[in-house]
Image (cartoon, grey):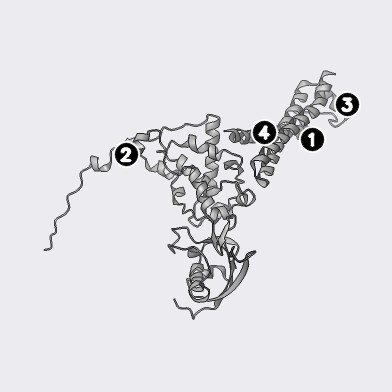
Amino acid sequence: MDMDKNNPITFKVQRYDPEHDGTPHFQEFMVPSSQSMTVLDGLIYIKENLDSSLAFRTSCRMAICGSCGMLINNYPHLACHTQIEEFHSDTLTVKPLPNLPIIKDLVVDLIPFFNTHKSLKPYILRQDAEEMENPTAEYAQVPHALETFLQFTYCIKCGICISACPTSASDKLFLGPQALAQCYRYCADSRDEGEKERFPVVDTDHGVWHCHLAGACSEACPKGLDPALAIQLLKRRLVSRAVALGKKQQPSSTVPSPAETKPKLPFPEFTVK
Amino acid sequence: MRNTYLWFLQLVTGILIAVLLGVHMVLMHLDAILGFFGVYVNDVTSWGSMIERSRQGIWAGLYIALLAVVLYHALNGLRNVILELTPSARTERVVTWAIVAFGIVAFVWCSYVPIALLSA
């Protein structure tokens, strides 16, 4: 990384160590910048060269793991997916994601977030328990059935939608856009029969009906998902079940695995000795 | 599905408010437009005209229905706002019952006048 070409950037990083600090405070670091440098690169530079006690989460550096969600210039971003030059500023303010408890510095506690996600049973639920436990074949799914929920499978559980959501800010018991979108993702899956188990969780005073449709979750999602759309589709699904409107499709049946329908091609013989 | 029914009713009452309040607004304030369609009303805001309308079952029913849907729509909305700002199970019970009680009292009190006029 060529650090000499561009001006240094001032990183104003929120620091908070619950064992020593009463309240969060800001600390400034001068970081040499270069073209295409990400905010995460800047934080790693600080940790390696200026202050090794700075705490933040990171793993993949390519917007896949969802570890490095943080508030950069007062907007939630993935630090690895955000270039410093996007801001056209010599100063960057970096804070932990709001609406989540702080563990230390930029690290937030994601356990309540994951627990809410788990409470919605984010996996295929079927009545045929024996087939689920000991599968003998695959469940069939046509491409257009997959497309009804495909975008919601790209969620990386970074917590950015929760931190952008105004309802999550005012209602601490609100399930949040991530969990609600995942609820829709599984209920809309043609292989799933879990509506009866998931609907009582989302049909509460702090569930799906408290979404104001602000759309901040969709605006902020670093993977380009539209959780606000999923929540509206989930509302429609709940109402259509409650007033017995709309067709409820039967879950897809099993099909023989490809190995049984089509024999494998023989491995080609090497022609070059 | 309790919350789903509550929200669905919120939608239905919203539509009903648009219709019933629309009738009220057109009658009270847009008599020129009614004249355009060949309907002529005489001084709808006068005391005598109001009493005369209230003694007709259809108008009394319309206003009592408007009262009911406005009360539901407003109080359910208020309940949602309060529960969002003060999230706890205890608050939920207290707020729900306080709002139900207020709604019943308001409905009985406010619908007394048209019912009394209708039966006079």
- Tell me the quarter of the image containing the C terminus of chain A: bottom left
Circle nearer the viewer, 1 or 2: 2
Q: Residues within 10 Å of mark 1 (few under 14, many from 20)?
A: some
Note whether A43 is above or below B79 in the view shown: below
Q: Residue at x 54, y 48 (%)?
A: A177
Name the residue nearer the viewer: B41 or A34. A34
Q: CA distance from mark 1 to mark 2?
A: 73 Å
> Mark 3: which secondary structure?
helix
Circle nearer the viewer, 4 or 2: 2
Q: Where does the image place residue A111, in percent across and percent down from the top left? A: 52, 52
Q: CA distance from mark 4 to mark 2?
A: 48 Å
Note whether B89 is above or below B110 in the view shown: below
Marks 1 & 2 on one chain: no
Q: Residue at x 59, y 35 (%)?
A: B4
Q: Residues within 10 Å of mark 2 (few under 14, many from 20)?
A: few
Marks 2 & 3 on one chain: no
Looking at the rendered structure, which numbered label has been put on residue A135?
2
Looking at the rendered structure, which numbered label has been put on residue B48?
3
Identify the residue at the far left of this view: A273
Residue designated by label 4:
B13
> Mark 2: which secondary structure?
loop
Q: CA distance from mark 3 to mark 1?
A: 21 Å
Mark 3 residue type: Gly
Q: Where does the image place residue A60, in percent across and percent down from the top left? A: 42, 62
Residue designated by label 1:
B32
Looking at the rendered structure, which numbered label has been put on residue A99?
none
Mark 1 residue type: Ala
Q: CA distance from mark 1 to mark 4?
A: 28 Å
Circle nearer the viewer, 3 or 4: 4
- Tell me the quarter of the image containing the N terminus of chain A: bottom left
Q: Residue at x 13, y 63 (%)?
A: A272
